[in-house]
Image (cartoon, helix red, strand yellow):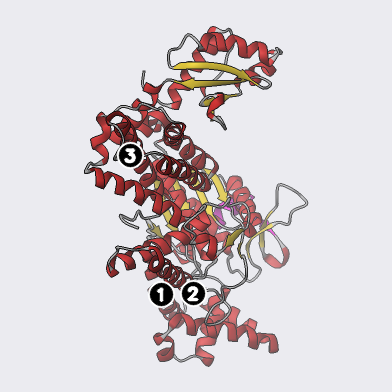
Amino acid sequence: MKSSLKNLRELILESIKVAGFESGLNEIQLAQTKTLEHGHFSTNIAMLLANKYGKRPQEVAESIKAELEKESVFTKVEIAGPGFINVLVEQNFYTTVCQAIVNSLDDYLEEELDLESNKKTVVIEYSSPNIAKPLGAHHLLSTIIGDSLAQLFRRYSYKVIAENYPGDMGTQFGKLIYAIRTWGDESTIEKEPIDELLKLYVRFHNEAEKDPSLEDFGRTEYKKFEEGDAENRKMWEKIVDWTFADIQPLYDRLGIRFDAVHGESFFEDKMEAVLKEGRSKGVFVDGEKGSWIVMPDDPKDPPALVKKSDGTTLYLTRDLAQVEFFEKEYHPDLMVWAVDVAQSFHFNQRFQVARKLKLTGAELKHVEFGRMQFKDGAMSTRKGNIIKLKEVLDEAVERSVALIEQKGAGLSDAEKQELARIMGIGAVKYNILHQNRVSNITFDWDQMLSMEGNSAPYLMYTVARAKSILRKAEIKVDDTEKYELSLNSSHETQVALGVIGFAEALKRAVEEFKPNHIANYLYHLAQSFNAFYNALPVLKAESKEKETRLLLIASVIQVMETAFGLLGLEVPEKM
């Protein structure tokens, strides 16, 4: 028998059937027990079946237990509490798992998660900055969460198209064009384009508060842009080029790569077809003063506006054209947008209208997240009132340098600088990803760069320590494939249990669109490994014990390196 949690569930399913009950494989959940005294895994399937068949949970559990005890892989089966079934698994099971993981984690996951059946296509849109504005700290959430989702779905055998959707259209460009021509100087702008453009945009709004008629000038300039005015188009192109020259180096620092970048302007010539289609289907109806609207499913909600009374389009118009483009270009099974919770109503409208128009048969998913909040308010920008992403990354690396100077004995200056980069960027990413995205994300420098607790430096130190042991043993990960486990310590067993839990963490992270399941899995595995490392000798252990511990260490390295990649983290060789 192959060894995986899937195989254990299959054995439990067979025992359920022999005991006279019916169940599905996905109904059988195996959770690790809190203490090894109660076994290795526990399932509540007997309670689910009892409710289904109108029997007492204990009675159902006893029937299943009798069949499970006939399977040699289970060395002990007990009933606990109101009907939980706890099982202790024989050692060869863990040997086979660890050997499979060090041989090929990819093949192991393929078998465990039946990834061959997941050959689907997903489009994931994230980051989507506004042109003419700097990337701020708040852009981190969409960018980092979205990129991790892309890595998770790729690992889950999906074909992933990572899309960036910059905001390069809208009335704000009319305002900015007016501001540049009224108060700006292109030679000054070209020296520090984003800073200067931001100043001009802020000035327009300050002046408009004194003279509201400026808003009309801004709208006029944007309407001229939409109608193809050559001068306004040329100025807009400059603004876009200036912005990307500023943004791309930051994406490079973060290791963010997109498969496609289609800004709002890309959909400019695709909106008319959507408008005509909506009109012909009777989905787009007349609103006030000649505007076009879509009536909501819930009469308590306001209608969705797809064309203004002056004939100009809106975000929603372009967003609908984007949905249609994704369908025609990629034929996806799933479309995902990683955008903060403030846009929930907008996405609800978008999805409603897309369904009414039958633009796609794909599942549409808004992966929402909370706002970024700062623990002590200590972070402040050096210029203006936007906390710039560049400043955040610079400070993370600077703080990492200081930490490494305290603890990084034996590293060369070049190694310290490289480690500071890996640790600083990793700390920023992990701080976001280890928190539940549906809550506000707290930014806390002390916690982020702590060498203890749930932080990137702690995890990096753990995997660097594990790799150091193999170097000292003068072996590579795949050299341990021939070793067998002899689990004589609870610390060893906890590491083996931790390693086998990776597949389930990956499955849950994908199903719930939550990278924090991978982050929390990594933290618990690191805790188990460090307890193991501190309690037991490895290189000086007896032959059989040494082989057991080296195989466990190799398995931990293999799993942690893969999990790091899912979170967009790099793995340092030394710390």
| Horizontal side, residue 54 vs residue 178: left or right | right
Evaluate whether residue 230 shows in this view. yes
Question: Label 3 is placed on what type of residue?
Answer: Val
Measured Cα–Cα span from mark 1 to mark 3: 50 Å
Residue 223 highlighted magenta (yes or no): no
Q: Earlier in the sequence, mark 1 or mark 3?
A: 1
Residue 277 highlighted magenta (yes or no): yes
Q: Are marks 1 and 2 in contact (CB under 8 Å)?
A: yes
Q: Residue at x 43, y 75 (%)?
A: 243
Helix, strand or loop at label 2? It is loop
Rate crowding at label 3 as few (under 14), some (14 to 19) or many (20 or more) other CA atoms within 10 Å.
many
Disc 2 vs disc 3: which is toward the camera?
Answer: 3
Residue 442, percent from left and from top: 59, 60
Disc 1 vs disc 3: which is toward the camera?
Answer: 3
Question: Label 1 is placed on what type of residue?
Answer: Asp
Residue located beneath label 1 in the image: 246
Please determine whether, in this image, residue 73 is positioned above or below residue 430: above
Q: Are marks 1 and 3 in contact (CB under 8 Å)?
A: no
* Between 339 and 260, the one nearer to me in the picture: 339
Evaluate whether residue 321 shows in this view. no
Q: Earlier in the sequence, mark 1 or mark 2?
A: 2
Helix, strand or loop at label 3? It is loop
Measured Cα–Cα span from mark 2 to mark 3: 51 Å
* Between 181 and 161, the one nearer to me in the picture: 161
- Could you tell me how many numbered marks the image carries? 3
Residue located beneath label 3 in the image: 538
Which label sits on residue 134? 2
Helix, strand or loop at label 1? It is helix
* Residue 341, quarter of the rendered image: bottom right
The range drawn in magenta is 275-286
